[in-house]
Amino acid sequence: MNIIEIIEQKRQGRELTGEQIEYFIQGYTKGEIPDYQAAALLMAICLNGMNQEEILAMTMAMANSGETLDLSDISDYVVDKHSTGGVGDKVTLIISPIIASLGVPIAKMSGRGLGITGGTVDKLQSIPAYRTDISIEEFKNNVKEIGISLISQTFDLAPADKKIYALRDSISAVDSIPLIASSIMSKKMAAGANRIVLDVTYGSGAFMKNVSQAKKLAKAMKEIWQGKDKKICCVISKMEQPLGYSVGNTLELIEAVQALHGQMAEDLKEVVITMCIQMLKLADRKESDAQLENEIWEVIHTGKAFHKFVELAQKQGADAAYLYDLNRLEKAPIIVPVLSDEKGWVKALSAEKIGKISIELGAGRKNKEDEIDRRVGILLNKKMGDFVENGECLAYIHASTAEKIDELVEKVKSAYAFSSKEVAKENVIYTIL
């Protein structure tokens, strides 16, 4: 078998066999196929797509490229959650300790930022000394002992996806349904959870730009997740504007901790509560949605959810003092307000533009080897449906340097659009599949 022939076959839009896909995955994982040839094939897939059989073959090949976990000795159900990506999406940091504090085991392997979307691993590493690269044995033991573990993708679990994931980011091949579906589901299969809730996002700040694409992606992932004792739920949500008020790793960690104390933006609250309810349902909880929501708020208001997050952080090496006193977290040296030149109601706030600005600031990666600056980002002060006076603050830019700051201020302003008429705030959740 020849990788050049495989690239040519997919470049011409023809179907790949399971054997060809397995050959590519094994060869790239072992380093026998170089980055430039892998990039060529991924771009051909991005341009020409894959059918469901190809997607399943790629998912299974990536899942089996390394070790796979069996978590059945922990519980009859271990729940996982995944988002297809968004700007300001810190939901995992909030809902995981909530669910764990309600007695449902959470075992989650997360990724770093991809394109304009932030990564859970980058946000977790904003907690000084938090270890995301623990061993598989420690990962399982943490779930057994405290009911939760959030880690980065280890080399032993789906190593093919780890390499492909980083390469996709550097060649602008991130918005492909086959590549997104196989990436997400291979990690889920390898990590051992048997109940999964997927937040499938669409809009300017997501890989899927419209609801029909989001539904297609959700369908592809649901069809992959077949088998005894496996359950899956897909929540379709809008990502037209950033979720919550913060974009940037430390800023989002701070907002997540505040949310665990009950302080949540309305759009963030809607997603958090919806996802939590669906996760509890998959864990065979029979209460009504209203009863489940009451239980969720109880563990938030009593502090159980926050203390579970602290327990997780300590278990994985972090200094919990930073979570108790958020002012101790390192902040960006330059904070500049963005003042509005207009008066009216915010009718649009482009998540895509804000995401791109955050990358310019250093909160995301332009190349897979890039180091990110966890201090920087954007703190929003006004969102869709809010009224703004001329000269009022729209947002704050948190930067490491004053270089290009005036240009960035103008770019943040350009992410906003205004109306002279009142604009109603919209729900974020579109539907549940």
Image (spheres, rainbow, N blue to C red):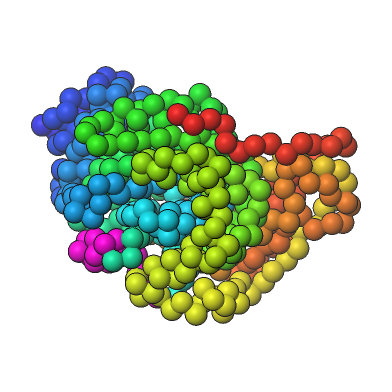
Split into 4 quadrants, where in the image is the N terminus?
Answer: top left
23 and 347: which is toward the camera: 347
**Residue 398, percent across and down?**
64, 65
The answer to whether residue 173 shows anywhere in this view is no
267 with respect to 85 (left or right): right
Instruction: Give the farthest residue toward the left.
Output: 1
**Residue 180, percent across and down?**
38, 37
276 and 400: which is toward the camera: 276
431 with respect to 406 (left or right): left
Image height of 425 relative to 114, above or below? above
The residue positioned 76% from the left and 36% from the top of the image is 424
**Residue 135, percent across and down?**
23, 65
The residue positioned 44% from the left and 49% from the top of the image is 114
Question: Which picture quadrant has residue 27?
Answer: top left
Q: Is residue 135 magenta?
A: yes
Split into 4 quadrants, where in the image is the C terminus?
Answer: top left
Q: Is residue 314 magenta?
A: no
Image height of 277 relative to 327, above or below? above
Image height of 321 relative to 131, above or below? below
The residue positioned 14% from the left and 33% from the top of the image is 2
294 and 7: which is toward the camera: 294
Image height of 303 relative to 392, above or below? below
Question: Which picture quadrant has residue 259?
Answer: bottom right
51 with respect to 197 (left or right): left
402 and 426: which is toward the camera: 426
Q: Please give the range of residues in magenta.
A: 129-144
